[in-house]
Amino acid sequence: MVVLVLVAGARTYMQRQSVPVTASFVTQEAVDDETTRLWIDVTRRDTSVPTYCIVTAVDYDFAEVGRREVIVPAGGDELIHVGVDLPVRKPAVSGRIYGCSEDIPFYMDTSQTYTAAYSAPTA
């Protein structure tokens, strides 16, 4: 039994070490009725590679009320604190990290950070 616990622990440790980028939710604040700001900490193993994370804002029922893809450009420290403004459909009370990756989608420009809220122009 002890050997199985040690093997499981070693496997978990090795899997966590192989993840190139992780993020954790720190806090949330309301900017206005249509915007919330999420603060996240992003840890990158290789700071010379741009990464991106998907963050979501949630309401009291844990329903997603806003989502944003955030580019973290190459360079800087291994651990960075990022503020992300999200447009929301309803007031948000918390946030979540959907995931992070070094594999940037083709439609994203790594020279931008995508942290400001965006409102579509009205007709």
Image: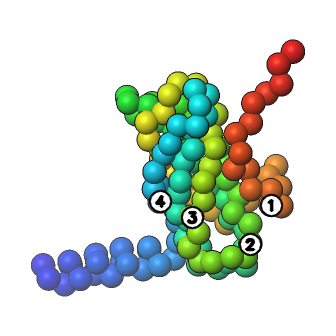
Q: Percent from the top left, x then y, of residue 39? A: 53, 53
- Residue 53 appears in which quarter of the rendering? bottom right
Q: Given the image, on which type of amino acid does mark 2 rest?
A: Ala
Kindly identify which numbered label has been placed on residue 110.
Answer: 1
Mark 3 or mark 4, earlier in chain: 4
Residue 98: mark: none
Tag 2 residue: 74
**Amino acid carrying mark 4 in the image:** Ser
Q: Which sits in the foreground, 99 or 88?
A: 88
Q: Kindly identify the residue that appears in the image at 58 percent across and 37 percent down.
A: 31
Label 2 close to label 3 by CB (< 8 Å): no
For marks 2 and 3 on the same chain, the one whose residue lies earlier in the sequence: 2
Q: In terms of image quadrants, where is residue 103?
A: bottom right
Of tags 2 and 3, the one toward the viewer is: 3
Q: Is residue 80 visible?
A: yes
Q: Answer yes or no: do the residues labelled 1 and 2 have beta carbons within 8 Å?
A: yes
Mark 1–mark 3 Cα distance, whole angstroms, equals: 18 Å
Q: Earlier in the sequence, mark 1 or mark 3?
A: 3
Of the two numbered discs 1 and 3 in the rendering, the one whose residue sits closer to the viewer? 3
Whether residue 103 is visible here, answered yes or no, is no
In-front residue for pair 5/106: 106
Q: Disc 1 residue type?
A: Thr
What's under tag 3, amino acid-wise?
Answer: His
Quadrant of the image containing the N terminus: bottom left
Check disc 3 and report the residue beneath it.
81
With respect to residue 77, does 32 lie above or below? above
